[in-house]
Image (cartoon, rainbow, N blue to C red):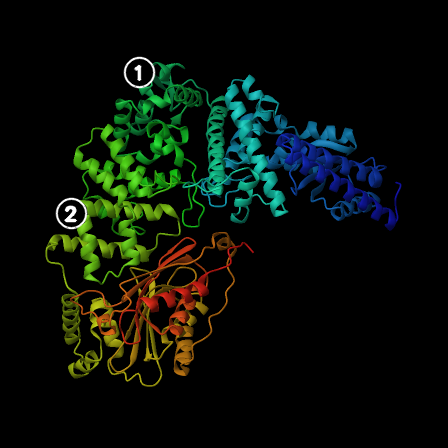
Amino acid sequence: MSTDSLSDFSQLVSALKQQLQTGEQNLHGALQNGTPINELVSQHAAQVTDALCHSWQQLLGDVSSLALIAVGGFGRGELHPHSDIDLLVLYENQLDESAQIYLESWIGVLWDAGLAVAHSVRDLAICLQQAQTDVTVATNLMEARCLAGNQQLFTRMQQQTAADRIWPAGDFFAAKLAEQQQRHASFDDTAYRLEPNIKEGPGGLRDIQTIAWVARRHFGDADLSTLVGQGFLLEDEYHELIRARDFLWRVRWINHNLTDRAEERLLFAQQKQLAAELGFSDRQQGTQAVEQFMQQYFRTVTHVERLNERLLQQYHEELLATGTDVKVLDSEFQLREGYLEARHPDVFDERPLAIMDLFLRLQISTEIRGVRAGTIRWLRQALQQHGDKLAEDRLALLRLLDVLRQPNGVYSQLARMNRYGLLARLIPAFAPVTGLMQFDLFHVYTVDQHTLFVIRNLRRFAYGKYAEKFSHAADVFQRIDQPEILYLAALFHDIAKGRGGDHSELGAQDARSFCRQLSLPRNQVELISWLVQQHLLLSRTAQREDLSDPEVIHRFASQMQDREHLDYLYLLTVADIAATNPDLWTSWKDTLLWELYQKAGTALQQGLSRPLQRAEVARETRSQVFSRLLRAKVDVTQLSSLWRTFPEQIFQRLDDQQLLWVTQTLLGQTLTGEPLVKARLLPDEQVTELLVCGVSYDGFFATVIGQLEQMRCNVFSARIQTTTNGIAVDLFQLVDAGGGPLHASDIERLQNALCSQLTEAVVPVPTAFSIPRRLREFLSNAEIRFSNYRQSGQPADQGEISEEQGEAFTRMEVVCTDRPGLLSSIANVLLKQKVRLHDARIATFGEQVEDVFKLSDYADRRLSADSCAALQEALQHALDLPLSTG
């Protein structure tokens, strides 16, 4: 050994750093100059190999008992920036002390030089033992290459751990298949995630490598081109797979450089940068650059998934199945060991309609386990030849309608059609949204995957599944006569995303045109088109409007026209919300939508010619609660005295359960001293309802909201009232940070804190919360809109409106990026602007909130135009965030 001093170690580290830095600069220049990514990956592995071998020779060149072996991706001669350098140091029987010392010194030199080595030190016996019991170890050793040291020892290891010696072909395939299935399950079996994993996710690089591993074990060669010679891949499929690998490699290379680490996820913080690096740009009146990039990513991994599925099916047929159990179905199809098989390669070319018949067979027959790999290939080839004609083939479209009308398998066959590329052929407008993501936190899935999940939810309603999650959908589903109307509306409800313009209107036009091709009755065509155009109406009304207002219910019911429209729209809305984001559907939303559905149904049943008035609603609520209180033997004198202090708005805006609870809580209370804070669980909504009462003062609401946000509570709604004797009676519906009702200990802590703060009547300064990482890429300026305000020059006394005339409040809508402390900031601005809040509806959609507030001045009049302008300026100043990712 030539070095044993600290200065020599330092010189070696410096030399390695310089060598690696030069190599990195050369690779960066090559990337900018358009060098193919496969060359960069190989060059980087070669550069690191040179550095490892040089340093090994300097420190361990005289140690003949060791072998330095590259394994994993590095063993294949592939290396991305910042990726782990997987190494195995192999010894035969025992590692002597001096070799161990020099080995530790060598590893230290590598780390000091900036090489991220992941190494293991094992003897030959342990390697064999682990390879026999762990398919991952066997796979790593299968790809090993010797870099330096004892070549004979390495050769012996290769001979003893060769997969064909210790893993029978069938067992190896089954183990790798199970490994992939487990990996996919950890990603919910979908590649369509907001921040997908390039390496491990479904359709990612690991899926390509799985194909190569099985090929190596089966054919003795990991080069994917071997699969062409063996008849497993066509030439164009091979090139498609290589293009997919190279695209994913390029994305991974740039992503590692941007994050300065081996980051395999496409995080929001890098997605826009990646799009720019890869040459994408925003389209005017269309999709953003980042959405185009992610669409190409998702389409790429979808292609990989398709090829992976077919090749693994073919491996299964080759390695595990005998193929002797054949059942002829007709002149075109047969079953081979339970898998549907075309009887000859030209079935789909001779009769393209056989493509549709294949899916109907899969749907109708319970004995079919799947489709043979060769048949999948023939189907894909036929689609390339005849796919464009299917959209104009009325018989093919009628077959699609037959699929939608079957009692079983609707979702599974539509998903299979999408996976094979058929759905976009039948409905050309579906092609642009295939793999299309929307750059936000609200839409978790690509448009095509979301659409299919909507249909999956509708099928769950049909089967009565997940009743605990969807309380009423199954019952409503039983009332509809033609479920295919729902499925067609679902297919088109988001089909115009990414085009610019109103996707609901454009989608309705597409739906009408397509349904006419099916020769559906005119009333069905119009219902489907209407459902597409109005698919957001029920959700927006339920989450943003005051459902205690009879005018809101009448307006919505008038848009429904009849119970049939209401039933179909309710089902589509529930399925749509639940398919947008796994965390979006909650008991709270379930209850809101059901409340609107019931009230609209009642209005339709009673007739729309005479809508209810607020005064009628108030009288009915008052009467129901009074009767219940009489049966409970309350003191009528106390009750009358209490209710005389209630403003009419309490009877108009609280439902009977709320009015009963508030009344029972306040009976006999003076509330002139310590405030009163009570909470109860609303079991159907799974939220906590909080009642806060006390002597009212400017900032009462801001104080309560400040404390709720300190405890990370999420407020869904607030009803703010003040009695005639100056007592605030405020109702809040909220959940904790985990999305569930408050625990008893949290309620007690909240009660103590609020009683203390409200007694002191001091408004806390809003806490400055940091913006969570995932929100930083979606910052936008607040949009603030006002309606029902007094025009300039209008006398102040005309700001007061009677209940017969309409709403007596100014309506303010705030749309902005969600962030901790948002509601507290708004409350403090309202306080400073001397604006009184009467009602708040809080709706969160991913990274965006759409809040609706009912406001007045301190004289309970609608706000003037000047007041609205001043309030808007103050809110913009408080809510607008720096549009950066810092």
Q: Which residue is mark 1?
A: 330
**Label 1: element kind:** loop
Q: CA distance from mark 2 to mark 1?
A: 48 Å
Q: Which residue is mark 2?
A: 562
Quarter of the figure with residue 761: bottom left
Query: Would you say 845 lies left or right of 625 here?
Result: right
Quarter of the figure with residue 228: top right
- What quarter of the picture does the C terminus occupy? bottom right
Query: Would you say 564 lies left or right of 181 here?
Result: left
Note whether residue 622 is visible: yes
Instruction: Residue 404: give x, y in percent of width and height.
Output: 27, 33
Q: Residue 385, relative to residue 518: is it above or below?
A: above
Instruction: Residue 220: give x, y in percent of width and height.
Output: 61, 22
Quarter of the figure with residue 84: top right
**Residue at 45% from the left image edge and 69% from the top image edge:** 710
Instruction: Residue 115: give x, y in percent of width and height.
Output: 72, 44
**Residue at 26% from the left image edge and 22% from the top image edge:** 395
